[in-house]
Amino acid sequence: MIISKLIAVLLVPGLGATLIFALILVWLERKLAALVQHRYGPLRVSPLEGILQPIADFIKLLISELIIPTESNRILFVMLPLVFDLTALLAVAYLPASPVLVIARSTISLVIVLFLLMLASTIIAVMGWVASDKFTYVGAVREVLQSLAAEIPLILSLISVAILTRSLDIYRIVLFQHALPIAFLNPLAFIVFVICALMATSRFPFEVPEAETEIVFGPYTEYSGALFALSFLGVYVKIYVYSMLATCLFLGGWYGPFSSMGTIPQIFWTYFKAGILATLMVLTRAAYPRIRIDQVLRLGLGTLTLMGAAACALSLVLSLLAIAH
Amino acid sequence: MSSIIPVGPYHPALHEPLLIKLYVEGELVVDVDLRFGHVHRGIEWLGERRTWIQVPYLAERICGICGDVHRRTYIAGVEKLLDIEPPPRAQYIRTIMLELERIHSHLLIIAALYHAMSFDAWFMQIMAIREKVMDLCEMISGNRKHYAMSVIGGVRRDIPDELKPKILKVIQEVRDYTRKVIIPVMEGDKTYQARTRQVSVISYDDALKYHLAGPTLRGSGVYSDVRYDEPYEIYPELEWEVVTHPDGDNWARMYVRAVEVLVSCDIIEQCVKKLPSGDILHPKAKPWLRLPPRVPEGEILSRSEAPRGEVVHYIRSAGGDRPDRWRVRVPTYANFGGIKPLLVGTHVADVPISYTSIDPCLSCTNRFEIVDVRTGRSKVLTETEMKLISRKYTKYLRDGVNKKVLNI
């Protein structure tokens, strides 16, 4: 029991898996985007197609000079990227990679994870505000608006899952899907969730808060060296959490196509699904231009909220039918 | 209560240094101020100290994209002063080069617009097709840029017959790609339309009022093109039409450019097919390849349609072997007049896109003049004075001496 907890914290789905997932995702994003764009992408640092490039970049950033703007609040400026990382990492605690490999369980784990994810968005906004620069300020305001647009439909899609499974425990929601993933039962909720995940993690076409050609790098503009590496890592940890959450809630978690499996195949299936989702999330970079913040708001608070409400209604109907049978 | 967001001099959205001060309320731009002069090179000053046949090489370097049109405009002016006309074959070759330049310039700015909205995948696809045009230019002239094709009285290099099928093949590829991919994406892609339609609208009247030029002017529905208004080279003999679009928004400006690529393809195809045989250099002009001519006294205003709009070269000769005065007015200078109707009322997010949509070229535009505010008199500095000021400023930066040392 203690050994499995230790593995869960240090390896899967805890620290080790998170870091490796993030580093591979950074590499995959650069490599696949390069393939679409007639480029090579990372090539040199590696046994295989520059796969170690993110690690090299990370080390380079850690040892490069740290510049802190004189007008910023120094303590907050240094602390916030750490808090951002911690918040995103804490959410991993409630995500099961297999029936035994789960760090913590709670009857309201879905609510806790949702709270931690929303806190992460707030921290990004505070990061932009603390740096006291015009670009970071604009980025912070956009981050607040965008997370507002993402959260309402996100909550609606989670509610529809809760209605269907009559549970707020992520672990029990996975158990519910042993026969059929919820993505097939309620595809509408799944679509809403994925689009909101794109919004909340600032992927294309919702890369509005970071918008390189408009406001340099949004809330992270003033961060350099190790602090930049940390905040950059935080963004990818967020993607990890969202794709793991989608796997657990909609794609049946550790369940594969075969009925009885050991721990290793269960971990494989979890990460296979999460990996494909995360890759799709970063690959939208190659398919979409960036849209404007008012268009994001119209989409989030209009169409997506309606779709989320419809997903709730669908869940309700399915749930009532299940009672009738 | 508005605050200022500085875009530039160094900013990811800008390809050349320039400071756009955006006065914003929230994300809405309420006023805009421009500061440029970071890339001033004193080309006119240099030109007035070089001979008639050295200046074209300098004129070509006014712009990094549309250099050939500057060279052609200057040379056409000198030819008029000398009262000679290049042979027809030379005029055809000049037209081919001008239109190739227009194609690659337009493709570049269409790609840059996609880059401004971070659609890098599409940016690279368009640059890939542009690369073929660049290779074609290298096949014809020996250079990707700065072709140095026109000389006084003709052209420097001939287009051999075995190159013709290659030109036609590349032109066909570019036309197919533009017609089947670039234009349908502009017309069909919803995200692209959401970012460009009804953004930064310049009306027909405003376009005339602010003296805009080129595709920016034609994107507002104004029927104006120097190739049509004041035909030069062999444009009147060819079948082509001026492209306009009535909408006046970012989308219309880019659409006009995309259709102009098709028109340029047609023009090049006709030129290659009709290319007459004969000399490429006026018989009187042979010695002028090495020796500068003595141009009779007089002044001339020479015009061409560059990819970005109308280019005007004013040349005055005092009868010597070098120009007495040479003045260039480039299209971006005219288009910057319309920066207010372009940017005021848009979002901060639209600024890179709207700014790119006028196809700005700053190295062409920068001029430098010192105006004494107290007396209102202006003067031009000599090279020595400039160097002195520069040294003083370096010293000031290094030692932190009192700023009064700078007394400019």
Image: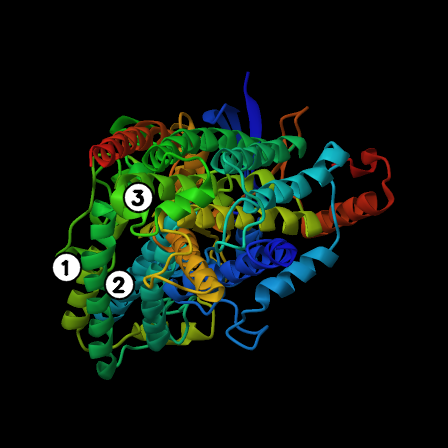
Of the pair A19 and A286, the residue shown nearer to us: A19
Image coordinates for residue B270, horizontal then vertical, percent: 15, 66
Task: Report which residue position mark 2 lands on.
Answer: B95
* Residue B192: assigned label: 3
Q: Split into 4 quadrants, where in the image is the N terminus of chain A?
A: bottom right
Closer to the eye: label 3 or 2: 3
Q: Amino acid at mark 2?
A: Thr
Q: Secondary structure at mark 2?
A: helix
Q: Amino acid at mark 1?
A: Leu
Q: Quadrant of residue B155?
A: bottom left
Which residue is located at x 44 percent, y 41 percent?
A: B352
Q: Secondary structure at mark 1?
A: loop
The mark that comes first in sequence, 2 or 1, is: 2
Asked whether disc 3 touches disc 2, contact meaning CB atoms under 8 Å apart, the reply is no
Asked whether disc 2 touches disc 1, contact meaning CB atoms under 8 Å apart, the reply is yes
Disc 2 chain ID: B
Rendered view: B132 above or below A222: below
Disc 3 chain ID: B
Disc 1 from disc 3: Cα separation: 34 Å
Q: Amino acid at mark 3?
A: Tyr
**Residue B141 visible to the viewer:** yes
